[in-house]
Image: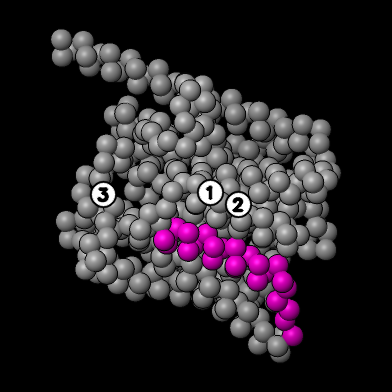
Amino acid sequence: MEYYSVIQIVLTFGISFILGFICIPLILAYCKKKQLYDIPNARKIHKTLIPRLGGICFMPSMLVSFILAVAILGFQYKGNIIVRPWSIIFFVSLLIIYVTGFVDDFIGLSPKVKFIAQIVAAILLTGAGLYINDFYGFFGIHDIPAWVGIPLTVFVIVFICNAINLIDGIDGLAASLTEIALGGFFVIYYKIGLFVYCILIAGLMGVLLAYLYFNMFGSAEKGKKIFMGDSGSLTLGFVLAFLAIKLCMDNPRVMPTDPLRMPYALTLLVVPTFDVARVIIHRLRTHRPIFKADKNHIHHKLMRYGLTMRQSLAVIVILALCFIVLNLFILRWTNFTIMFITDVIIYTLFNITLDKITINKLKRNAEARA
């Protein structure tokens, strides 16, 4: 079983990667023909017109991965494979998110409409029986009732969707952090033996790698550069949220109970979730609307210090990897609560330190010019 699953995973990754390299140039040509560009403004980093529909190919890649997994497994088990209702509901929910982002990329949608669509998609998932039902001792909490777990799950899904969407501010950042998280989820699900999830993850990782090539190394002047847009970032956020919730839910019929799964899920999403939480807290503290965009995300702060876009990307990716290594070490010796508190302290100190050295540098530059 495991041998065949590896073949399926590699095949799915390869097909998805190739599809990305086929589809993205077609999307670029379409955007050029229809003049569909991400327009620069005071808040955005880029200064040239760049197509923003790269994420359109993410959802089809996931569908191809799913169909391929079902087809191969169905053949392997001579057609004796069950597609459960919640799997259909997952793809319906994902389609809602994808279409919302798609429409927003083409004609624009208000934050309220996008927010409602995310809530509807999240409620559908919880209605299928997928929700957080155990805190595994986090701050002394274990089992939680459905009336707490279901609204909490809806909040978590919407929160993660927006975390990935909001951190998509410089080339390669949202995609790189998503690749890291997907890689972590892949390892966990592979060890559990849920190979269908590994195939789905591989499908998304393949097309995302193709997208990274065009996003980071494509020439804007030659019309080879592309952004993922909301169709991409919202899709990535929803898939990550689904994988995290699925991992966190205590369901012995599907996988054995493991108190480390919830801290693992948080570890893989520390940087985007902590960043959006910090930004929201900052806006509340300064009496600003929490949904009004600003330039206070971690990548903005690193570039304000003087780092280039690529340098800022490298710092954030290294930070995300460091949290993974640190948390794996912490969890060997202590518990989830201590891990979470440690992460909050480290991320807070990182931002405070960055703010201080940036202010000092700006002061020195001002004095030098004077």
Q: Which residues are magenta?
A: 80-103
Q: Quadrant of the C terminus?
A: top left
Image location (x, y in percent) of residue 219:
21, 57
Q: Which amino acid type corresponds to the residue marked 1 in the rendered image? A: Phe
Disc 3 or 1, which lies upstream in sequence? Answer: 3
For the stretch drawn in magenta, the main secondary structure is helix
Disc 3 or 2, which lies upstream in sequence? Answer: 3
Give yes or no for residue 14 being in the magenta stretch. no
Marks 1/2 in contact by CB < 8 Å: the verdict is yes
Front disc: 3 or 1: 1
Which residue is rendered at x = 51% and y = 44% of the image?
163
Q: Quadrant of the N terminus?
A: bottom right
Q: Which residue is mark 3?
A: 39
Distance from disc 3 to disc 2, alpha carbons, whole Å, reads: 28 Å
Give yes or no for residue 88 being in the magenta stretch. yes
Which residue is rendered at x = 24% and y = 66% of the image?
34
Q: Which residue is mark 1?
A: 115
Which residue is rendered at x = 76% and y = 59% of the image?
129
Q: Which amino acid type corresponds to the residue marked 2 in the rendered image? A: Ile
Q: Which amino acid type corresponds to the residue marked 3 in the rendered image? A: Ile
Closest to the observer, 3 or 245: 245
Secondary-structure class at tag 1: helix
Q: How is the image coloured?
A: one colour
Question: Visible in this render: residue 13?
Answer: no
Q: Which residue is mark 2?
A: 119
Secondary-structure class at tag 2: helix
